[in-house]
Image (tube, helix red, strand yellow):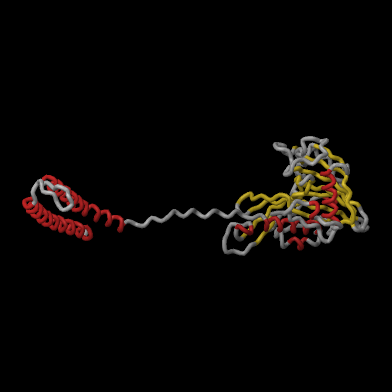
Amino acid sequence: MKRQRRPRKAAKKQIVEAEAWDDEVGEVEVDEARETSADEPDDTGWKTSTAQMAGLSRLIRAGVWALVVSGPVLGTLAFLSASAPAQGATKPAPAATPASPVGPAGFAELFVSAYLQAGQGTERDLAPYYSGSLALAVKPGTRTATQSTVIASREVQPGYWSVTVAADVTAHDDKGKSKRLGVQYFRVGIQATGPAGAGGTAQNTTAGYAATSLPAQVAAPTALKPGALAYESDRGSSSSDPSVETARGFLAAYLTGTTELDRYTSPGTRLQPISPAPYAAVKVTGVQDDATSAGQQKVPADGTVLHQLVLVDATDQAGSPVSLSYALTLKSRAGRWEVASVDDAPAIRASSPPSAAPHTTTPSPDASTAVPSPSPSNS
């Protein structure tokens, strides 16, 4: 309240000073009006009348009073703006970091590998993964995972993951003979501690993982039939087709290193041959592309783009053939085709999603593949 008195005192002082100044101006105006004739021109040639001087005087008075009256208002606004809290820009709330499945997935993969190899008398080998009390009926070493990988990982609740591991399982009998059982799938429940980057929910804690039970063997995921590819024209492997010849020369240089790659690529293309060269020879067995005319042999106008799917049989350094396929993008320039890029994946037709394919693989029956049931947990 004390701060509001100062603007009022200042405004009152301004009013008194303005009235005094107004009186002085009025007196000067009257004196000048008397001394100056109504029709007498001034030095500039303009004629100044008493009525004109009076109007100017009223205009000056109005301006002075406007300043005087607005003084308290401006002072109050200044006081309010100074006392109001500063409003900064609203800071956006930090986005929550999604939990990473990498840690739980890796732990589950190790657990499944150890589980397949463990057996009666070696249950302690599973202690780093599963702390529950158990007794395995299978002989140790009866099964092994020659390869394994995680194919699915889902957070069923914060810090708790369901991980599916695919393992290429081999069975071993008492005589030392091995039999490949094929790829089998195991689902594991994994609890994670630590920050979100480790799959957990807590900060400033050490990452850790624990399986909540033994793995459960599950069915293979549904097989899919890919959508239709965008290569509708079949060029075969004719040496009379300029685009086929470009693909043949490029892939030979790319895979064998016997010729320069630049002679088959567009200017500015940064493609390098595989080094060291993995193959000694390359044979093109088929070419498909997305050209509108299957019988087109002449190279079109410069800048025309052509997408190819090239099938090859490459002979490795040991003389064994290896079948490969490459998706290439070609561009026309100066009457010839040139490779612009090796594409990341073959092109598919628009609106051509994959469809479910019938599952025809029947796993070989083997008693040793049965999943042992754990004894009741004492923990």
Q: Residue at x 9, y 53 (%)?
A: 32
Q: Horizontal placement of 288 versus 105: left or right?
A: right
Q: As drawn, is 141 to the left or to the right of 109?
A: right
Can residue 145 be seen here? The reply is: no
The C terminus: image quadrant: bottom right
In depth, the one of 187 and 138 nearer the eye is 187
> Number of numbered discs present?
0
Q: What percent of the width, then of the height, locates residue 245?
A: 85, 46
Tell me the quarter of the picture where residue 126 sits. Answer: bottom right
Q: Which of 209 and 234 is in front in this view?
A: 234
- Is 287 situated left or right of 93 in this image? right
Camera-nearest residue between 141 and 102? 102
Asked whether the viewer can see residue 59, the reply is yes
Residue 268 as seen in the image, left or right of residue 241 = left
Q: In which quarter of the image is residue 232?
A: top right
Q: Which quadrant is home to the N terminus?
A: bottom left
Which residue sits at x=14%, y=55%?
18
Percent of width and height locating residue 367: 86, 49
Residue 336 screen position, x and y as percent: 79, 46
297 lies above or below 79: above
Q: Which residue is drawn at 63% across and 62% down?
A: 207
